[in-house]
Image (cartoon, rainbow, N blue to C red):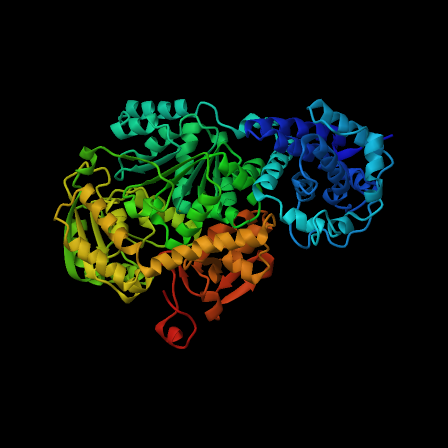
């Protein structure tokens, strides 16, 4: 008789044996207590027992097009096993995290999961499969389970009913269905059990079935080797503050160091020989750069990428479809994961695969770099998430790291760069009481001297206007424009061009330069902005302080767009602080000015309201959902499922690229579609007639004009006046 199959080329028992072995190793490495380890092992051994149905086995042999959901068919067996084992390990009858994990190992837990299914037709060889499975559990030390005959006898009544009916029947808790019991389980326990099951199951199907691939060994020596290599290539030995970070044994670190002094190396030295590192940054561009950097230190196979375009980046960089890499990276399962903070926060809002992400985050060292870069709503989400689920170690780092901001987070050991580094005076500050639109004459004069000039505007419209004047009014050849409304393809090209500029280059940009680009220009000309943003912009000229103070010209008359972006009060306070700075401020004086701004802003009514909204949102979402995964078809919940407030964007396809998009799809390169998309504010879609869904491309087309030189062009004044759109 043909053997029972788990997959067309793998027997069921062989697969269960592999998953159980891997699950046992993973549970031990994650240091699960005895109770949760046993639950994880029950889930690993029984997760596919539901494949012992007639239609599933026929499906494996190509005799059917689909099969009864095997996760649902596994429900009665896991329910009985977990109940029986509970007598041995003394857990309560409704403590069913293993059963819930098995039920949901292919579909998220939710109120409508598996409704309406009938009784499955189990295969005649079910007793044989169950006997082998119970023997596997016994081999890894799980006690309290009977013989397969007694087990089947106990399960007989359940097997006569539809598992779906059991799921929605009344459970051990009065007034609650079994589904309701699953929702009310302790989320961290359910998440840990399901994480072990998923990781073991995925590893069993991966190219390398080795759980050590999920954990890092010798991390500290790898970082030290990287620093030694930098010294050989003309770099530097560990600075004093880096050595102090390496020697720190505390679980919370606060690190403050000026731009370009080796903050990242200090953070990595502090992590030591951790098994898991989650490095969180504000933008996809900073994440991509750090991903490449950490791969050189820890090895390509050990470092994952997690953000909205990670699948595209991996396919492009690795020149293949790295399924295992994408899967393990997306759930923070690789030893080192570099991600946007959004990915971490959306896991705490119960997004897809929240169970793995939150479980593994709690057992990781988390580094929150550029912590100053987030709005109050995002910080509220973050503070609430950390209070609920603290990682094993936590580092907060920034070039400014305001004390008022630190008070929001767990108390840590503050390590600052040595005073000699803070006394660098890298900039010569000049305030001009006019508009940034008047700046091009000076910019061209500097460029004619061979200097590289960075101009930063506060809005995309102002940046585009300046660029047009530079091109049409001055005819300057070495010019570049960068903002967020370029296609991903054009933006990548532009970022490469501006990293190593020609002599006399004028680079006009928006806030995208503040945390996204590793550049060092000779001159900065900028519109007034919040002092912390200005410090970041100043960090893009004379970055390492190797030259005499670089000119920084700040135009103090802000535009209407700038006031909408930052608020009048924030700009007024920042201007007042700027006026109090010396002509050549040190990094210390710039940091102190930032601290003073935060002292004022963080106590303002608006800031506190948005911060508390973030905290309350995460608290309410977790309270409502419990162990459920968020349902994004629910409009109310979808509105809460964001890590940002006021920065929500949607990617659209300019009409000029529609034909190219179809050609990519036709040639099997649909994965490259992100290259052609442009982000726009989400509210544009509600107020404009410029957008049309393209169903077969799964995207939205826009008829707004797009120029590879200037990016997406906003509607004209006439269109705006007609009520089509609000231009930001």
Q: In which quarter of the image is the C terminus?
A: bottom left
Q: Where is residue 563 in the image (x, y as percent from the top left)?
A: 29, 64
Residue 224's place in the image compared with 581, above or below, is above
Residue 473's place in the image compared with 664, above or below, is below
Q: Quadrant of residue 572?
A: bottom left
For residue 462, say whether it is visible.
Answer: yes
Q: In which quarter of the image is the N terminus?
A: top right
> Horizontal placement of 299 versus 180: left or right?
left
Q: Nearer the viewer, residue 361 or 552?
A: 361
Count of numbered badges drawn on the protein: 0
Residue at figure coordinates x 71%, y 22% from the top left: 139
Q: Which residue lies furthest to the bottom in this view?
A: 722
Q: Position of residue 481 (x, y in %)?
A: 31, 54
Q: Which residue lies furthest to the left in this view?
A: 583
> Horizontal placement of 368 versus 569: left or right?
right
For residue 507, say whether it is visible.
Answer: no
Residue at figure coordinates x 55%, y 58% from the top left: 637
Q: Which of 141 and 104 is in front in this view?
A: 141
Q: Where is residue 394 in the image (x, y as percent from the top left)?
A: 40, 37
> Horizontal placement of 39 versus 444: left or right?
right
Q: In which quarter of the image is residue 465?
A: bottom left
Q: Nearer the viewer, residue 661 or 453?
A: 453
> Horizontal placement of 71 versus 28: left or right?
right
Residue 321's place in the image compared with 700, above or below, is above
Q: Position of residue 456 (x, y in %)?
A: 27, 54
């Amino acid at each position: 008789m043909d053997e029972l199959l788990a997959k067309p080329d793998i027997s069921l028992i062989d697969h269960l044996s592999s998953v159980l072995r891997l699950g046992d190793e993973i549970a031990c490495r994650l240091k699960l207590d005895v109770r949760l380890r046993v639950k994880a092992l029950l889930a690993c051994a029984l997760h596919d027992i539901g494949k012992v149905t007639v239609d599933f086995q026929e499906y494996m042999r190509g005799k059917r097009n689909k099969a009864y959901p095997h996760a649902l068919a596994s429900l009665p067996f896991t329910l009985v096993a977990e109940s029986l084992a509970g007598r041995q390990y003394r857990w309560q009858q409704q403590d069913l995290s293993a059963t819930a994990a098995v039920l949901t190992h292919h579909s998220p837990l939710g109120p409508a999961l598996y409704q309406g299914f009938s009784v499955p037709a189990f295969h005649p060889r079910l007793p044989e499969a169950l006997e082998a499975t119970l023997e596997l559990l016994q081999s890894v030390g799980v006690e309290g389970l009977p013989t397969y005959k007694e087990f089947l006898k106990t399960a007989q009544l359940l097997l006569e009913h539809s598992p779906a009916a059991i799921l929605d029947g009344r459970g051990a808790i009065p007034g609650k269905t079994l589904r309701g019991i699953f929702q009310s389980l302790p989320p961290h326990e359910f998440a840990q059990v399901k994480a072990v099951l998923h990781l073991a199951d995925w590893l069993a199907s991966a190219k390398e079935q080795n759980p050590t691939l999920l954990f890092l060994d010798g991390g500290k020596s790898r970082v030290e080797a990287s620093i030694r290599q930098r010294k050989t290539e003309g770099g530097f030995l560990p600075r004093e503050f880096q050595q102090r970070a390496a020697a720190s044994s505390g679980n919370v670190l606060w690190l403050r160091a000026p731009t370009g002094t080796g903050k990242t190396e200090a953070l990595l030295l502090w992590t030591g020989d951790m098994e898991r590192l989650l490095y969180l940054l504000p933008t996809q561009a900073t994440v991509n750069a750090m991903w490449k950097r950490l791969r050189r230190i820890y090895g390509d196979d050990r470092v994952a990428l997690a953000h909205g375009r990670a699948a595209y980046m991996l396919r492009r960089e690795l020149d293949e479809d790295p399924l295992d890499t994408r899967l393990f990276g997306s759930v923070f399962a690789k030893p080192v994961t570099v991600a946007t903070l959004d990915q971490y926060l959306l896991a705490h809002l119960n997004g897809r695969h929240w169970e793995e992400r939150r479980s593994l985050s709690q057992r990781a060292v988390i580094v929150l770099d550029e912590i100053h870069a987030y709005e109050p709503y995002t910080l509220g989400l973050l503070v609430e998430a950390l209070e609920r689920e603290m990682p094993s170690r936590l580092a907060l780092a920034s070039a400014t790291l305001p004390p008022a901001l630190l008070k929001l987070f767990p108390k840590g050991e503050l390590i600052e760069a040595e005073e000699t580094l803070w006394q660098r005076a890298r900039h010569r500050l000049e305030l001009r009481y006019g508009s940034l639109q008047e700046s091009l004459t000076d910019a061209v004069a500097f460029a004619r001297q061979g200097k590289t000039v960075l101009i930063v505007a506060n809005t995309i419209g102002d940046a585009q206007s300046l660029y047009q004047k530079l091109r049409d009014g001055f005819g300057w050849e070495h010019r570049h424009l960068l903002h967020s409304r370029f296609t991903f393809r054009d933006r990548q090209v532009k970022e490469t061009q501006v990293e190593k500029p020609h002599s006399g280059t004028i680079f006009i940009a928006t806030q995208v330069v503040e945390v996204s680009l590793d550049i060092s220009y000779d001159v900065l000309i900028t519109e007034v902005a919040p002092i912390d943003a200005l410090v970041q912009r100043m960090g893009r000229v004379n970055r390492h302080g190797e030259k005499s103070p670089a000119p920084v010209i700040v135009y103090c008359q802000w535009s209407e767009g700038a006031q909408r972006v930052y608020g009048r009060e924030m700009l007024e306070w920042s201007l007042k602080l700027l006026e109090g700075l010396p002509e050549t401020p040190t990094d210390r004086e710039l940091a102190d000015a930032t601290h003073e701004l935060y002292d004022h802003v963080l106590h303002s009514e608006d800031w506190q309201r948005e911060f508390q909204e973030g905290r309350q949102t995460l608290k309410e979402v977790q309270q409502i959902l419990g162990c459920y995964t968020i349902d994004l078809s629910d409009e109310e919940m979808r509105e809460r499922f964001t890590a940002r407030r006021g920065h929500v964007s949607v990617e659209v396809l300019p009409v000029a690229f529609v034909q190219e998009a179809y050609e990519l799809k036709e040639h099997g390169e649909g994965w490259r579609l992100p290259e052609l998309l442009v982000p726009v504010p989400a509210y544009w879609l509600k107020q404009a007639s410029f957008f049309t869904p393209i169903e077969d491309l799964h995207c939205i087309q826009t008829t707004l004009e797009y120029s590879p030189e200037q990016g997406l062009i906003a509607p004209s004044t006439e269109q705006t006046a007609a009520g089509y759109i609000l231009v930001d």
